[in-house]
Image: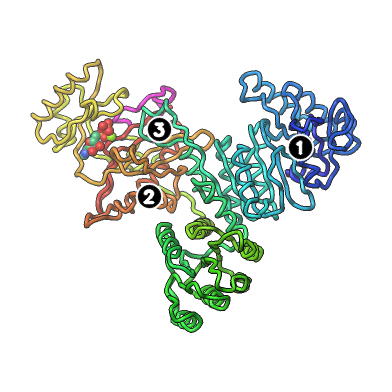
Amino acid sequence: MLDGLFRPRAVAVIGASANPLSIGHIVVRNLLDHEFKGPIFPINPKGGSICSIKAYRSISEVPDQVDLVNISIKAEYIPAIIDECGRHGVKFAIVHSAGFKEVGEEGVRREREMVEIAHRHGMRIYGPNSQGIQNSDPEVSVYANFTFVPMKPGNISIIAQGGGMGELLKLHLSKVGLGHRLYCSYGNECDLTMPEILEYYGQDEGTRVIMMQTESFKDPRAFLEVAARITPHKPILAIKAGRTPEGSVAVSSHTGSLVDQAAMAEALYRKAGVVQFTDSDEMIKAAIALACQNVPRGRRLGLITNTGGPGIQAVDEAVSRDLVLAEWSEAGRQRLEQSLYAEASCGNPVDVVATAGPEHYFAAVDTLLKERDTDMVMVFLVTAPFVDLDGIAERIAEATADAEKPVVVVVETTDRWARLIERLRGAGLPVYEFAEDGVRALADMVRYGELQRRPAAEPPALDVDRQAADAILEPWVGKDTFLPQTEAYRLLAAYGIPAPALAVVSGPDDLDEAVREVGFPCVLKVDSADVVHKSDEGGVVLGLETREQLEAALATMRDRFRSAGTRFVVQRQAPSGCELILGAKEAPGLGALVMFGLGGVMVEVLRDVSVAVAPLATPEADALMRAIAAFPVLTGVRGRPGVDLDALRDLLLRFSRLAADHPAIREMDLNPVLAYPRGEAPLAVDVRIRVR
Ligand code: ADP
Ligand code: MG
């Protein structure tokens, strides 16, 4: 339980000083200004008073039990202070100070020592190098944090790794007159972890929406488990982590270069049902809508406007976000026609026209909310100065008062009518400036609704031979190398992943047997751990139709790759099909990630791939395929047939199971897999497997 951190009964500030520019001073000021409900104890060896309250020389002199201390003294003094706090019964220490892990060896040692001492006393450390926490619950009102955005009660809680992003999220909520509930920027995570805090947010009754920002996951598995428990009843919105390409592995496989921290975050979020954002502004706007409106049950949108252009913008945005423009029932259409001006347009968007007054807006909103086939409504209002605008705001508020369906409002106006916006917000309606923002907020709510309602799914039972695979891998484990082609294909076969017939050849003497096993047409390839892109180095010859052609190709290739012991493989040539890439990569602390995309050069140019945590459940395999922009290519475009998606899903399930079952596999590329129209199994024609 983190009540001692987020609901402390008393707070001490170690390092409090009279200097108004010191962290300790600012924390005391913030606690005072935000009327913390318990006693505040500034601690300063000189005693005296700080911000007009008595300062104590040390924590031991404080008469009361203290739950929380904020510490901003020099790092080297902290372990001793932690010990003193522990003896005094302190439960949590927020360490603002830097000078730990991030400064190297010495700092790592100090961090470990500090945590050990704390644990001896049953105390927990938050940070170090962290900004602190806030809880706006009026019963507590704790601002144990050194920043500047005023705190005001709200129901959106924020959890951020970095203070800069955390502060930005708060700032924007405050700019639109909203507050927040819990806040934390957790820094180094030396002891108390992000998933523990998230769990607390999930249980906090005053928190309706959680916004998070994370740069790296210390324990991705723990995060996944906690987040997955929260998202069915409370939305978590997350800004994607930054991209950190891992140059060292980039050359060894496609998957290595395409699956980075950001891709892992994406996979984690998807699996946990977290709504992801690339844009912080959009995330904040979605949080605002979710904080005061119900989640839509479907994708059907009803639009109301009093001017044309923004209506069109709204429609375009809605369509690009896969929302559906709702259609009205006959009764609904009749009511609109009877209630609105003759020149109004009663389709979707409903254009009530600029001269529309309170009754027209009321009729339009009320009608749409009652339509069975409408899941959500956006109301646009440009403040035409020749109508009763206050009346309109009033009637919109009335019409939406008990609405089950979500409503967002967009108001185009100047400061002169700021009171309208306040009136609407006061009625619990999210208000935006641009039509696109309103639509996006609804579309993001739809995304959450779909994640929330998706059925829980376990990976299916598959007929795979795990022991055979273990036996194939066993001799290679610990060598940090690539499997020879023969072994790699045997491994795939153990998991039921089909590939064309294959034979190894070292020289011309092996050709007769290879031809018997493989047949024509065939392909000759070099088989070497050192050759990453075989075709770039002349290591692939396609379209060999006769024994003579094969022999000639082998002679040339042997010339080219002279190093002793180089092997070659003859592989049956597969019919041309749709080229796909499947990748797998170990993700420390999580297991394996799998990646899917269209093969060829485009995968690297466009990075059009999707990533998921292995092993996949059936709906996750479907989602993985659908998540790439090029998905329509797979269903068939321009008269070209699509591929057998059932067969492809089966392949993904098997491939992800292979990766998940065998931690010895560090990276695995099937590039390409050739997929075919319905009825034909896809074939892996190139495989590269790196063993740890
Ligand atoms: P690399 O990726 O190392 O250059 P590949 O084995 O993937 O080598 O071969 C290069 C290309 O040749 C593939 O992308 C595919 O288009 C084609 N190819 C390779 N093997 C076969 C095969 N057995 N049947 C059909 N096409 C193949
Ligand atoms: Mg290849």
The residue sitting at 50% across, 58% down in the picture is 434
- As helix, strand or loop, the secondary structure at mark 2 comes to helix
Residue 69 at x, y percent in the picture: 78, 35
Report how far apart the C-alphas of labels 2 and 1 lie in the structure: 50 Å
Crowding at mark 2 (Cα within 10 Å: few <14, some 14-19, many 20+): many
Q: Amino acid at mark 3?
A: Gly
Q: In the displayed structure, would residue 418 be above or below residue 46?
A: below
Which quadrant holds residue 512?
top left
Relative side of 373 to 51, left or right? left
At horizontal 66% and vertical 63% (from top left) the residue drawn is: 426
Pointer 1 local density, CA inside 10 Å: few below 14, some 14–19, many at least 20: many
Residue 27, disc: 1
Q: Main secondary structure of the magenta part?
A: helix
Amino acid identity at mark 1: Val
Q: CA distance from mark 1 to mark 3?
A: 45 Å
Label whose residue precedes the other's in the sequence (3 or 2):
3
As for residue 381 lying within the magenta part, the answer is: no
* Residue 687 appearing in the image: yes
Q: 432 or 687: nearer the eye? A: 432
**Is residue 501 visible from the viewing direction of this image?**
no
Can you identify the residue that label 2 sits on? 625
Q: Is residue 610 above or below residue 555?
A: below
**Residue named by callout 3:** 256
Identity, as a three-letter code, of the amino acid under mark 2: Met
Tell me where the magenta segment starts and ends, as one range: 467-489
User: Could you say which is closer to the camera, residue 359 or residue 319?
Assistant: 359
Residue shown at 47%/66% (left/top)? 301
**Seen in the image, is 75 located left or right of residue 432?**
right
Q: Is residue 227 left or right of residue 18?
A: left
Point out residue 683 in the picture as x, y percentages from the top left corner.
27, 43
